[in-house]
């Protein structure tokens, strides 16, 4: 079949075309556009406001928690005599070091059991 | 109509598209005024329901406003808008009325051959066709597009487009026989 069209149907389509120019329609489209723009702006302002509120509410407690955690993890467990010796044992001589060793031990235990 | 829109009424479309793409709402209102008849007619043929068609065509213009900054070649505004209209129609079809096309035995009753009735009866006849078939028919007969162009625009295979148009045309000839046959007789008389 070629691109040729049935001339009778073609004439019917041409005859059915109406002149649909209407200022009310244009106003309705522009109203939709303004509403969409307004809603988008409200959405952006809302998101920014929500972020600011979360920042205000949570920044201080989160910062405090992070500081407390860092202090706890870096707490030395026992006093080591000598500067160089203390420096050498520093990775193990802390809460973080102990937790690290415990996790490493748990990992080896798990590997042994599952082997 | 605002004073600014009144000024734009005289301007070439490429310039108005360019202004609209820079965010000028009066320029876009002028584009709506110029193109609304075409988009609304296209949607009415596709949709078969005037109020639904107007709603969809407004959605087409809203999408056009949102994307007009992406239009690089202002001289392609018409075909770009057509692409948006077809996409909007296809999306609407995917979201709605999956049972459309079930009433294949409907027959169009013809009261007279004045212009509004031709449009209404044609829309009713088109609404009895399955969505992709009516879309291909509308793009072929209303938009005068070739089968290749329809395939490219809709994403359908060329063979499918040809088959849709053949089947759709046969169905329309049956449904609109009362419109089509008198025209033949008139031609024969001449």
Image (tube, rainbow, N blue to C red):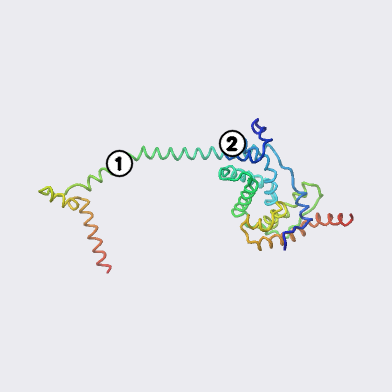
Give the secondary structure at mark 2: loop
The quadrant of the picture occupied by the C terminus of chain A is: bottom left
Residue at the spot of label 2:
B24
Q: Which mark is residue A63?
A: 1
B72 vs A83, left or right, is: right
Q: Which mark is residue A109?
A: none
- Chain ID, mark 1: A
Q: Residues within 10 Å of mark 1 (few under 14, many from 20)?
A: few
Q: Position of residue B105 (x, y in %)?
A: 73, 60
Position in image of residue B87 (x %, y %): 61, 51
Tell me what residue is drawn at x 16 percent, y 49 percent. Answer: A87
Quarter of the view holding residue A37: top right
Q: Secondary structure at mark 1?
A: helix
Closer-to-camera residue (B18/B137): B18
Where is residue B186 drawn, in percent x and y?
A: 87, 54
Quarter of the picture containing the N terminus of chain A is: bottom right
Q: Residue furthest bottom?
A: A115
Residue extending furthest toward the top: B3
Residue at mark 2 shares a chain with residue at mark 1: no
User: Callout 2: few (<14), some (14-19), or many (20+) C-alpha neighbours within 10 Å?
Assistant: few
Closest to the observer, A67 or B30? B30
Between A46 and B74, the one nearer to me in the picture:
B74
Tell me which corner region of the image, top left, top right, bottom left or bottom right, holds residue B16: top right
> In the image, is B145 to the left or to the right of A11?
left
Q: In the image shown, does A68 or B84 lie closer to the viewer?
A: B84
Labelled pair 2, 1 in contact (Cβ < 8 Å) = no
Mark pair 2, 1: CA separation: 47 Å
Residue furthest out toward the left: A81
């Amino acid at each position: 079949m070629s691109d040729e069209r049935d001339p009778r149907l073609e004439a019917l389509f041409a005859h059915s075309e109406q002149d649909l120019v209407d200022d009310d329609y244009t106003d309705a489209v522009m109203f939709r556009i303004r509403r969409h723009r307004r809603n988008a702006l409200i959405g952006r302002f809302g998101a920014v406001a929500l972020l600011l509120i979360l920042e205000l509410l949570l920044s201080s407690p989160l910062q405090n928690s992070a500081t407390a955690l860092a202090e706890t993890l870096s707490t030395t467990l026992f006093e080591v005599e000598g500067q160089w010796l203390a420096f050498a044992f520093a990775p193990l001589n802390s809460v973080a070091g102990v937790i690290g060793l415990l996790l490493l031990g748990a990992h080896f235990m798990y590997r042994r059991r599952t082997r | 109509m605002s004073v600014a829109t009144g000024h734009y009424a005289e301007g070439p479309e490429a310039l108005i598209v360019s202004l609209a793409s820079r965010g000028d709402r009066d320029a876009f209102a002028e584009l709506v005024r110029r193109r609304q008849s075409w988009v609304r007619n296209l949607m009415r043929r596709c949709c078969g329901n005037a109020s639904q068609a107007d709603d969809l065509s407004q959605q087409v213009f809203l999408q056009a406003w949102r994307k007009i900054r992406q239009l690089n070649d202002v001289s392609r505004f018409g075909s770009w808008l057509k692409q948006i209209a077809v996409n909007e129609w296809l999306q609407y079809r995917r979201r709605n009325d999956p049972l459309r096309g079930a009433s294949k035995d409907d027959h169009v009753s013809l009261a007279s051959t004045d212009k509004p009735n031709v449009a209404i009866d044609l829309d009713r006849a088109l609404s009895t066709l399955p969505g992709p078939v009516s879309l291909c028919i509308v793009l072929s007969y209303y938009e005068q597009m070739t089968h290749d162009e329809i395939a490219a625009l809709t994403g359908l295979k060329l063979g499918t487009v040809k088959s849709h148009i053949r089947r759709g045309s046969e169905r329309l000839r049956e449904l609109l026989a009362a419109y089509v046959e008198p025209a033949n007789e008139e031609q024969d008389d001449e």
